[in-house]
Amino acid sequence: MPEVKLHDGSTIEVQVHGEGPALLLPVNPRPVEGPRAEELRRWGNDPALGRSLIDGLKDAFRVVAFDYEGHVLQVPKPDTLTPDNVAGDVLAVADAAGAARFAWYGYSWLAVAGLQLAIRTERVSALVMGGFPPID
């Protein structure tokens, strides 16, 4: 699977599955295992959510999966994780996957990242936002 260079010089692995319109999914494509998986289940989460999304969508879409949240947790970017740089990172992933236009799915802060992406480029064909943080 290809690796993509991000704004800070770090790299992220990208997986591409299926055929059809491009759908960028910033999810962990590898199921979480062991004690962490049990903890996720106790909170009502699916430790294989990324894999489940990929497998469920790859028949209709070219799914471009990359664990952006996991990457940011492993390689923190407190001074450079700005909306412009996040959008640039996503566009670098899209470019590496050959996706001139793409749909975006994001949950929580990655939903907000998708919104920031959509206002910065005409390449977003659809925006799916889950768990959008409440605005008080």
Image (tube, rainbow, N blue to C red):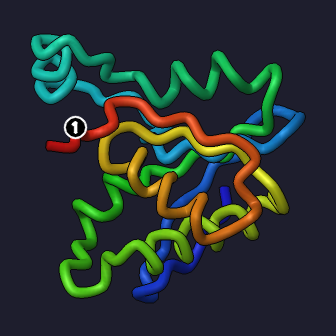
Taking the view exactly as shown, the residue that stands out farthest to the front is 136
Q: Quadrant of the C terminus?
A: top left
Taking the view exactly as shown, the residue that stands out farthest to the right is 20
Q: Nearer the viewer, residue 49 or 107?
A: 107
Q: Secondary structure at mark 1?
A: loop
Residue 130: where, in percent of width, then height?
Answer: 41, 30
Q: Quadrant of the N terminus?
A: bottom right
Question: Quadrant of the rendered structure where residue 3 is?
Answer: bottom right
Residue 90: where, in percent of width, then height?
Answer: 57, 65
The residue drawn where x is 61% and y is 44% is 104
Q: Amino acid at mark 1?
A: Pro
The residue drawn where x is 38% and y is 37% is 107
Q: Which residue is mark 1?
A: 134
The residue drawn where x is 76% and y is 61% is 123
**Please, is residue 99 above or below residue 121 in the view?**
above
Residue 26: where, in percent of width, then height?
Answer: 49, 47
Q: Nearer the viewer, residue 52 or 32?
A: 52
Q: Nearer the viewer, residue 13 or 118?
A: 118
Left or right, 20 with reference to 120: right
**Please, is residue 123 above or below residue 102 in the view?**
below
Question: Quadrant of the rendered structure where residue 16 is?
Answer: top right
Count of numbered marks: 1
Left or right, 51 with reference to 63: left
**Please, is residue 52 above or below residue 99 in the view?**
above
Residue 122: where, in percent of width, then height?
Answer: 75, 64
The residue drawn where x is 68% and y is 68% is 121
Question: Quadrant of the rendered structure where residue 23 is?
Answer: top right
**Please, is residue 113 above or below residue 26 in the view?**
below
Bin the neighbour count of mark 1 within 10 Å (Cα to Cα): few under 14, some 14-19, many 20 and up.
few
